[in-house]
Amino acid sequence: MNPFARWFGRGAPLTPELKQLIADWQATPSPPPTARFAATRAVVVDTETSGLDTHGDRLLAVDAVGLDRLRIQLADSFDAVLRQAHASARENIVVHGIGAAAQIGGEEPQLALLRFLEFCGKSTLIAFHAPFDEAFVKRGVLEALGVRLRLQWIDLAVLLPALYETKPTLALDDWLQRFEIAAPTRHSALGDAFATAQLAQIALRRAQARGIEDFGSLARLARDARWLRDSSSRPA
């Protein structure tokens, strides 16, 4: 069985057209590790899922906002609800607001995730609790398109505390409140992506003030901050 069927209910072979579009995306050059975020584009990502299990639950929606040279433009955004073989549980729908009809009538996952790759290019991806979004996106892209996604991700949940020297347990809502960022459509994937993009702007400008100018250095800072957080939580 095509593993694609396990998530979305039916296996679908890649058409020659899709294979060519995937090859075109794979041929897109990656920015160098020293690419300055004041001169390039990153993409802020948020997902909605059928649950919290990155191995067993399903990717329902993926949304993204471009952050081009530290600027957000409303037109530079991506929104897709992925078609499901069956809707998620009612209590799950209450969380993300994607109703049963929207899930069952969503976009063909192969096309939606290919559009997502084309939107992102090879940009650095930024998310709040990035390992969660990364796991669902990578799994969805692999099962739908057969592509092993190896893009750089930066986790704002560990980067912001490192930049502002505060406790690493603050939730997204805490950071939004701290910087007075309005999020009228909170808990929708696109609304959360726009709110997180504003946080990313703030984080990148803070990083610049500390002499950090490129995404490679920023990713290393986030990785080091995660290691310090995780090591401090281990029993002695």
Image (tube, rainbow, N blue to C red):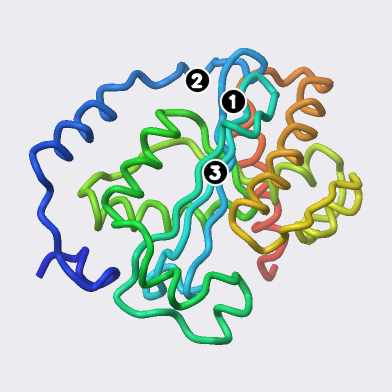
Count of numbered circles in the view: 3
Residue in view at x 74 percent, y 32 percent: 201
Q: Which residue is mark 3?
A: 64
Question: In the drawing, does residue 234 fall left or right of residue 149?
Answer: right
Residue placed under numbered mark 1 in the picture:
215
Q: Residue furthest top?
A: 39
| Mark 2 vs 3, N-terminal side | 2
Cα separation between marks 3 and 1: 18 Å
> Residue 161: horizontal and vertical position, in percent?
79, 46
- Residue placed most toward the observer, 147 or 192: 192
Q: Which residue is mark 2?
A: 33
Badge 3: residue crowd in 10 Å (few <14, some 14–19, many ≥20)? many
The x and y percentages for residue 120 are 45, 34
C-alpha separation, residue under disc 2 versus residue under disc 3: 22 Å
Q: What is the secondary structure assignment of the residue under circle 3?
A: strand
The amino acid type of the residue labelled 1 equals: Phe
Give the quarter of the image for residue 19. Answer: top left
SS at mark 2?
loop
